[in-house]
Image (cartoon, grey):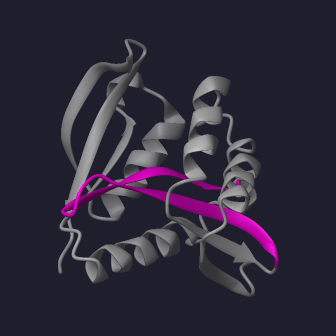
Amino acid sequence: MIINMRIEQVHNMLERKLIAKEILMKLPDWFGIPSSTTEYVENSGSLPMWTAYQGSEAVGFLSLKLHNEYSAEIYVMGVNPDYHRQGIGKMLFQCVYEWCQNNKIEYLQVKTLDDSSNDPSYAKTRDFYYSMGFRPLECFKTLWDEWNPCLIMIQKVVI
């Protein structure tokens, strides 16, 4: 049960890395390739990050990559599995969407595993992004590698 849930933007580079590492390590079904997880953690240190806290515990985060003055990408997002299906991902997304609106970012994108992979964990991920208003743009079959087809999903930010 969510009590004392709050979302805060994290500005300290080391804190962003620690939060990303702590949460991603609890999500092996999504982040099971150690080299990729390390890259997400390292890059999260230099990206804007919003974190969901239950009391003093970081239970979810979202890192945003700014591509240019018009577009941004949900670079990496994770919620502690003990807190899945409680609206934390939606709260994080809503904070980032509002930030994009306030900063005149017109398009938001996310990369995820395409449905041709038949991965049940990523089916849940795609369902989440659909529910947040994202739509598929294009699948790059070999961007990551031939076993992990990359689906780019996009959304127009209403300014």
**In the rendered image of this protein, does residue 128 appear above or below residue 96?**
above
Residue that protrudes farthest toward the top in the picture: 146
Q: What quarter of the picture does the N terminus occupy?
A: bottom right
Q: Main secondary structure of the magenta part?
A: strand
Tell me if 146 is positioned left or right of 135 in this view: right
**In the rendered image of this protein, does residue 17 appear above or below residue 39?**
below
Assess whether residue 73 is covered by the magenta stretch: yes
- Closest to the observer, 40 or 150: 40
- Answer yes or no: is residue 29 visible: no
Please tell me which residue is depicted at 71% across the width and 65% down the height of the picture: 59
- Closest to the observer, 82 or 138: 138
Please tell me which residue is depicted at 63% across the width and 24% down the height of the picture: 35
Please tell me which residue is depicted at 65% across the width and 34% down the height of the picture: 38
Image quadrant in which you'd find residue 68: bottom left
Image quadrant in which you'd find residue 146: top left
Tell me if 58 is positioned left or right of 62 in this view: right
Q: Which residues are magenta?
A: 56-80
Tell me if 56 is positioned left or right of 7 in this view: right
Spot occupied by residue 50 in the image (x, y as percentages of width and height): 55, 69
Assess whether residue 58 is covered by the magenta stretch: yes
Spot occupied by residue 153 in the image (x, y as percentages of width and height): 26, 47
Please tell me which residue is depicted at 47% across the width and 47% down the height of the picture: 124
Q: What quarter of the picture does the C terminus occupy?
A: bottom left
Residue that protrudes farthest toward the right in the picture: 56
